[in-house]
Image (tube, rainbow, N blue to C red):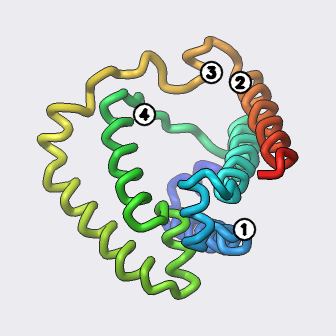
Amino acid sequence: MSANLHENKRVHLLFGLIFGIGFGFLLQKGGVTSYDVIIGQLLLTDFTVLKLMLSAVIVAMIGLHLLKYLGLVEFHLFRGSVGSTVIGGCIFGIGFAILGFCPGTLAGAVGTGQMDALLGGVVGMLIGTGLFAHLFPEINRRFMDRGVFPADSLPELLRQPAWAVVLVMVLMMAGFLYILENSGI
């Protein structure tokens, strides 16, 4: 059954649409499509975005590893590098700082009808994507393979079973969320 689902591109698109709408709905309900909340996160005065995203990472980490254990998904890992991480982080950070939205919160803000997200964000993402695609051969040649990571995943790097790494990461993130929530910030 999972092989049939894996090959069916329409099912992929349908799942992507359903989960995307659900994710956007939860972002909006969580308050992170608000410019003021996002700027508060960047100024370290409002940690709503961090709390919501860490909660999402915990749920996704457990869910994905459970699905993998059940044989319903396969991980397709890509060996990263310091160069690609720095380039990606700079592009993400510049866009985030200029407009006050990351790609997920931008899509959620567009869904709520915010014109700054639609005109500034979507147009900016299209222009940025076009520029990156145009400059990619040069960027790839100069930066992308600099400092290739020694492993594809944290469990592989630590030489530990995936379940142990997931358990430790979930406990650490949940502990951090507990401290953050009870610190009054």
The secondary structure type at the circle numbered 2 is helix
| Separation of marks 1 and 3 at Cα, in angstroms | 31 Å
| Mark with earlier residue (2, 1) | 1
Residue 42 x %, y %: 54, 54
Q: Nearer the viewer, residue 79 or 51?
A: 51
| Separation of marks 2 and 1 at Cα, in angstroms | 28 Å
Q: Which residue is mark 4?
A: 78
Q: Nearer the viewer, mark 2 or mark 1?
A: 1
Q: Nearer the viewer, residue 3 or 101?
A: 101
Residue 76 x %, y %: 50, 38
Q: Amino acid at mark 1?
A: Gly
Q: Which residue is mark 1?
A: 30
Residue 49 x %, y %: 65, 57
| Separation of marks 1 and 4 at Cα, in angstroms | 31 Å
The secondary structure type at the circle numbered 3 is helix
| Mark with earlier residue (3, 2) | 3
Q: Amino acid at mark 4?
A: Phe
| Mark with earlier residue (4, 3) | 4
